[in-house]
C-alpha cells in the first residue's frame, strides 16, 4: 500500500485521524504531525534510526509574526544553528536540505535595514560540511508597496546536499514546457533533428510562483504559508516514493501535504496545535486527492502559432 492509500484509511476513522497529530515519532506512520518543539521531533527521529531524504522548511524569519518572539539577529542565528545541526543528524547520505527564507528587517520606515537570511545562514550550513547546489530565487508578483526603498518581490531557497557527488536529483518529473519546442540542430552530426527534450526543459533556479495571499486558492488561517507547488518541485526532484520528508517548522503543513500528494512519508513539528489541525486536514485531503492546489504544471508559455519554432514538432506528437 502506498502512502496515500495508507493515509486514506485514516480519513474515515476518527481515532486514527486524531493520531496523525502526535507527540511521538513513529517511522511506520505515513505522516507524523508533531505537537512540540522542532528539536524534540528531530531528536526522536534520530533515536528511531530513520533518515530523511529531504528536510524542507520555511523557518520563522524573526519579523514579529504572531508565532514568533522577536530575537536579536545573533540570537536568531544561534537558534537556527540548533535546528540545522539537528537536521544534519537525521539526513540520509544522499539527502538534501532546503531552507526557504526572506529578510530579517531591523527598524521601521526609512530606518529599515534588511539582512538577507540566506547570506546570514550560509556559513552555518557550510560549518556542518553541507554543499550548496543552488540558491533558488523565488519571484512573486505581489506584496507590500514600499515608498522609501524598492518593494520586495523575492525570497530564496538554499538547496544543500550532504554529499557533493552522490545525491538524489530527478529532473524529468519537474521539467517545464519549452519556449521553442520546434528548434532543431543546425550544425554538427544531428542537423535537422529536434534539439530539445520532449519532456520539457529544466525549470532553472528562478521560480515564478505567486505567494499565498488572501485570494490564493491554498490560503488557510496560517499567516505565512509557502505554496504547495514550490515544495512539490523539491519533493519530486530530491526524493523518491516512500522517502521521508521532514519540515521542522511545519505551520499549515504545506510540506507534509506536498509529500503525501507524491507518496512520500512526512513528519513536521509546530508549537501551535491550531496550525497542526489545519495541517491534518490538508494531509488527509491530499491523500484523498481533494486538496485544492495551484497546479505545478501551469504552462509558462503558450505556443502562439506565428512561428514554426513555437509549435510542438510532429515527431513529439507521435
Ligand atoms: C513560516 S511558518 C511555516 C509555514 C509553513 N511553511 C507553511 O507553509 O504553512 C513557521 C512556523 O514555525 C512554527 N514554529 C516557531 N517556533 C517553533 C519551534 N520552536 N518548533 C516548531 N515550530 C515552531 C510557527 O508556529 C510557524 O507556524
Image (spheres, helix red, strand yellow):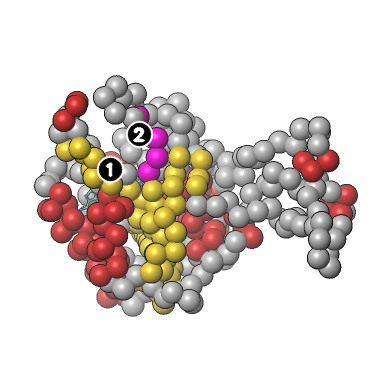
- For the point 60% across and 61% down, the residue is 171
Q: What is the x, y in percent for residue 213?
A: 40, 30
Range of residues picked out in magenta: 151-155
Is 23 placed above or below 216 here? below
242 and 156: which is toward the camera:
156
Q: Is residue 76 left or right of 30 when viewed as pictured?
A: left
- From the image, tell me which residue sits under label 2: 152
- From the image, tell me which residue sits under label 1: 103
Q: Is residue 27 visible?
A: no
Q: Residues within 10 Å of mark 1 (few under 14, many from 20)?
A: many
Is 110 placed above or below 206 here? above
58 and 153: which is toward the camera:
153
Is 144 placed above or below 199 here? above
Q: Are marks 2 and 1 in contact (CB under 8 Å)?
A: yes
Identify the mark at residue 14; answer none if there is no mark: none
Query: Could you tell me which secondary element the residue under label 1 belongs to?
Result: strand
Q: What is the x, y in percent for residue 255?
A: 42, 52
Amino acid at each position: 500500500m502506498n502512502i496515500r492509500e495508507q493515509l486514506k484509511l485514516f480519513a474515515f476513522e476518527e481515532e486514527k485521524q486524531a493520531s496523525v497529530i502526535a507527540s511521538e515519532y513513529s517511522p511506520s506512520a505515513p505522516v507524523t504531525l508533531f505537537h512540540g518543539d522542532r528539536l524534540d521531533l528531530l531528536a526522536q527521529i534520530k533515536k528511531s534510526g530513520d533518515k530523511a531524504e529531504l528536510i524542507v522548511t520555511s523557518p520563522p524569519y524573526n519579523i514579529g509574526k504572531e508565532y514568533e518572539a522577536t530575537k536579536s539577529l545573533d540570537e536568531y542565528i544561534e537558534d537556527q544553528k540548533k535546528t540545522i545541526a539537528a537536521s544534519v543528524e537525521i539526513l540520509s547520505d544522499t539527502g538534501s536540505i532546503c531552507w526557504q527564507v526572506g529578510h530579517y528587517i531591523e527598524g521601521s520606515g526609512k530606518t529599515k535595514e534588511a539582512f538577507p537570511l540566506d547570506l546570514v545562514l550560509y556559513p552555518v550550513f557550510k560549518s556542518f560540511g553541507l554543499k550548496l547546489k543552488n540558491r533558488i530565487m523565488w519571484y512573486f508578483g505581489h506584496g507590500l508597496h514600499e515608498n522609501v526603498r524598492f518593494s520586495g518581490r523575492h525570497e530564496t531557497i538554499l538547496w544543500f546536499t550532504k554529499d557533493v557527488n552522490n545525491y538524489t536529483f530527478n529532473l524529468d518529473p519537474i521539467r517545464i514546457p519549452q519556449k521553442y519546442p520546434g528548434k532543431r540542430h543546425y550544425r554538427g552530426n544531428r542537423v535537422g533533428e529536434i534539439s530539445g527534450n520532449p519532456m520539457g526543459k529544466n525549470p532553472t533556479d528562478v521560480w515564478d510562483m505567486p505567494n499565498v495571499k488572501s485570494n490564493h486558492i491554498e490560503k488557510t488561517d496560517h499567516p505565512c504559508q509557502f505554496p504547495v507547488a514550490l515544495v512539490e518541485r523539491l519533493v519530486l526532484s530530491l526524493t523518491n516514493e516512500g522517502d521521508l520528508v521532514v519540515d521542522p517548522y511545519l505551520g499549515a503543513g504545506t510540506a507534509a501535504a506536498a509529500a503525501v500528494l507524491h507518496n512520500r512519508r512526512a513528519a513536521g513539528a509546530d508549537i501551535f496545535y491550531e496550525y497542526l489541525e489545519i495541517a491534518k486536514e490538508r494531509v488527509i485531503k491530499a491523500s484523498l486527492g481533494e486538496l485544492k492546489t495551484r497546479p505545478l504544471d501551469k504552462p509558462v508559455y503558450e505556443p502562439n502559432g506565428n512561428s514554426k519554432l513555437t509549435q510542438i514538432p510532429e515527431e513529439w506528437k507521435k
